[in-house]
Image (cartoon, rainbow, N blue to C red):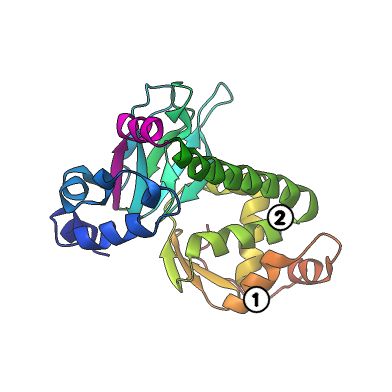
Amino acid sequence: MDVLKCAEGDGVGTVLALVASHPVFSCFSGELMTPTFIGSHLKHYPKHGILYRHNTQAEDCFLICSGRIGLLAEGPWGSPCMLGIKSRGAVVGDLSLFDHSARTSTAKALEPSLVLVIPYDLLRKSLVENPELSWSVLGAYAARIRANDERLVEALNLDLINRLARRLVDISQGQEQFVLDITQEEIASLVGASRERTNKALITLQRCGAIAIDNHRIYRVLDPDKLVLLALKRRDDRTDAKRLTNHSGPVGSNII
């Protein structure tokens, strides 16, 4: 989707269809399902644009219609770390809907992105008028908790190369080429490893022919089957990971 054309109104129908098919927002008040609401609440963020900042008051959540949004955690440990990368169909900024707390992360557009800004007040009003909608929201939070549990299981059962392959499969969304314009430290924080180890894992994925990286940020998936296979490997089956680590083939100069 061309985010600039959509922001100008040409793609309102496309966003309306996205809302209509969303597992949570499709259940809410008809106010969310009108071209007028969609058109007035669409917002385009340029690359590096900030949707919201850590520890600020929360009043809205954001449905990503196109582009990629990075979630960064900030704290006394130094540079912000990347918690996750969200893309089309995902919702960010909804954690404070019920407890009225401040933002727990900073949301930044990693590329030009179009989002639908949904005020908390509208959602709360719909929940009061129709309490059964709470089941849809609770289901969404249950799915998120399950996903977080899976990430913990990954940390225990997957080697770094496998965790990195899994994140790249998620981020690519089936695309043969995508831009991932984040720092080495942020990539490392996504997979829970040091920058040095993550860099070596990226080199390994290039040497085995799964991916190529151009200009430090343009990722090309050369062998989707191999990348998916590595994403599914468990620690009990280290054969491929060890073989790839020992691979001595050539690698391009444009590695991260």
Residue 185 seen: no
Q: Quadrant of residue 62?
A: top left
* Residue 40 position (above or below residue 88): above
Q: Position of residue 51 (x, y in %)?
A: 33, 37
For image coordinates 62% across by 61% down, the residue present is: 166
Count of numbered circles in the view: 2
Binning the other alpha carbons within 10 Å of mark 2 as few (below 14), some (14 to 19) or many (20 upward) gives many
Instruction: Give percent across and percent down for residue 129.
Output: 36, 33
Numbered disc 1: secondary structure: helix
Q: Which residue in the rendered view is the most extreme toward the right?
A: 236
Q: Say above or below: 58 vs 227.
A: above
Residue 208 x/y as whole percent: 66, 74
Give the residues in magenta. 113-130
Viewed as shown, does residue 116 lie left or right of 130?
left
Q: Which residue is mark 1?
A: 226
Q: Is residue 4 visible?
A: yes
Residue at the spot of label 2: 160
- 46 or 103: nearer the viewer: 103
45 inside magenta stretch: no
Image point 71% across, 66% down: which residue?
Answer: 232
* Picture quadrant of residue 48: top left
**Residue 230 against residue 15 in the figure, above or below:** below
- The three-letter code of the residue at mark 1 reads Lys
Decide which of tag 2 and tag 1 comes sooner along the chain: 2
Residue 187: which disc?
A: none
